[in-house]
Image (cartoon, helix red, strand yellow):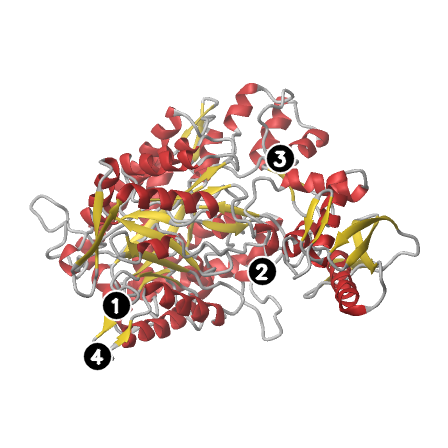
Amino acid sequence: MESSPRKPQLSENAMRVLEKRYLRKDIDGNVTESPEELFQRVAGNISTAERLYGKAEKCKQWEGEFYRMTVSLDFLPNSPTLMNAGAELQQLSACFVLPIEDSMESIFETIKHTALIHKSGGGTGFSFSRIRPKNDVVKTTKGISSGPISFMTVFDAATETVKQGGTRRGANMAILRVDHPDILDFITAKRDNSRLNNFNISVGVTEEFMKAVQENRDYALINPHSSEIVDRISARKVFEMIVEFAWKNGEPGVVFLDRINEVNPTPQLGEIESTNPCGEQPLLPYESCNLGSINLSHMVERRDGKARVDFKKLGDIVAKAVRFLDDVIDMNRYPLEKIREMTLKNRKIGLGVMGFADMLIELEVPYNSKEALEVAEEVMGFIQREARAESARLAEDRGTFPSFKGSIYDKAGSPKMRNASTTTIAPTGTLSIIAGCSSGIEPIFAVAFVRNVMDNDELVEVNPLFKSIATREGFYSDELMKKIAQKGSVQGMEEIPEKWRSIFITAHDIAPDWHVRVQAAFQKYTDNAVSKTVNFANSATREDVEKVYMLAYELGCKGVTIYRDGSRNEQVLNIGKVNRTAEKGDLVIDQSLLTPRARPSVITGSTRKMTTGCGNLYVTINEDEHGLFEVFTQMGKAGGCSSSQAEAISRLISLSLRAGIDPRAIVKQLHGVRCPNPGWEKGGMILSCSDAIAKALERYLLENKTPSGTKVAAMTGSFENSAGFCPECGGRLEHESGCAVCRGCGFSKCG
């Protein structure tokens, strides 16, 4: 171990995330661990695996190697390992798949196991394909089956109930085979965006189905209980329905089950039916997987003034990372004995990458280019070869994984392997914040953005690579950074040289097919699967989505997830704790609850007359220097239930506005609320007093003639490519790698 350990080079944002989610705290919630102590804790714990192989004298050596690799941010393991290694819990895996058989006992046993896994910080994947369809007769009770969708809601409710100590949220993947009789209900299960919010859902697509789509013919729906064909329906129409709902709200995704099982490393143990929550880790029932990611932004060197991939350093980190992840398997404390047995039997690890977009920028290669695909294949091909070589070396020293006999490696001329799989491209939303790099293999999300427009619309965050290059090339200015922050992109800005506009291209600047091509390039050299989101502009058509699904199939991807900007109509409702700090003198107070702004003595606004079925409603909207502040309502005729309800609604709106809630979220909540007595006016129908207030607020904002209106317009530009608002800090969510992540506080919808 180094006598004076290096300190990690952490951004302010990375420190905030570490303090909130990773560093140890005392009983009062005070942080008692530094980042370097975290990395020492993890390295010291994982390196003790050497003792299991009779090499206790090697523990200190590997503790030093693991520490240097993580403290330098060259490699980071998945979040549960960082959180729990060397701690009481010692649950180190991120991914689990649990089986669900067609019985009440199996279903509720799995719910219990799910709760235990979520409590320990893991995410879970399930196939509901074995459950008999709804309305099928249950012979033992003479009752009627409620079908897989109804049981998904039970899993969802259980996940909602389980708390994870404020560090990670429960996350689930639900997969249903495309030939299940309830597939249409599954495809439309998230039609109502308030349902199944703890699930990602993906259709398990077969080769037979895809051929039927291409040939525009029917395919069979099969009852999993009886194995009988119960119907034949148009594959084309089912495919169009998948596309339709993905276009509407990003789900369902698609998982190509047959393609996954073609490379199932242990087919003798069964068929793979499901993946982890973000789709990148196909697993057998009761398997878990330990993931880790190499920071590619640190794998670039400059020679003779030219940047190139540092393959020597990359190879060194790959070898150490494979050993680290293999050690994690031994040091893990598994939530279930069956999971321990299955994980040790196959010893799957998933080494992946983050910072790919940063690497391309340093190499001066546009993300949407043939050269980028060549870099992707060269780098991932190298990682896979080196990872397998290290797994083979470990097998010589420690033995093969126990289920090696009968595996795809059990053939003449193949090396012995320590791990049934070695590579996975996982989401790295929170890890990439800590490492200070771009997430996974995603493009950069924004070149510059406003961190908290409701608190301080001058707080502009700029991509550090862009800031460095802009300063070096002489086109940096604070004014330009603010301009970029309004939409996040530099496209169309003549102040920036064309070369750098092409290199600093963001997720929403890139045509969807390039997202798929990059995913496919990495998939060529990845044992498991690749987590990646294909981003679409709001104006994208259903045909655009369909083309991407077909392209992903044709290029050899194992699955595909898309997100069309603004498609989830609830996205602006997710706003949470905005303006979390308030100043009082020189003291900054961390607020766990929102505190409404005090009312100034003078305030300005305007009053609108709205025609409702209960009479004229006069809506007064006022604002202070920070934006919308309060709403008053008065009925044309005093008294009555309508008048009191309108007053109560306006008071609650005022409280929300003063606490910093986005007014668009309020409009969205109230818009369309109906009562038995609608009213009519020139602008159309007013459905209720609530609807009238929403329309009045909306019109006020759209006029854009006030400080508040200008601010909302700026917010709209700044957030146009976001996936909504973070429920914890109020920052914007970025939809990436099949998940939504807040780069402000590290919140992730996927755990």
Q: Nearer the N terminus, badge 3 or badge 4?
A: 4
Which circle, 3 or 4, is nearer the viewer?
Answer: 4
Residue 562 on image: x %, y %: 42, 43
Residue hosting label 2: 19
Residue hosting label 4: 140
Q: Is residue 509 left or right of residue 524?
A: right
Residue at left offset 89%, top offset 56%: 600
Which circle, 4 or 2, is nearer the viewer?
Answer: 4
- Disc 2/disc 3 C-alpha distance (Å): 30 Å
Residue type marked 1: Asp
Residue type marked 4: Thr
Q: Is residue 695 visible?
A: yes
Q: Nearer the N terminus, badge 3 or badge 1?
A: 1
Q: Nearer the viewer, residue 579 or 101?
A: 101
Q: Residue 642, which numbered label? A: none
Q: Is residue 231 left or right of residue 311?
A: left
Q: Is residue 56 visible?
A: no
Residue hosting label 3: 487
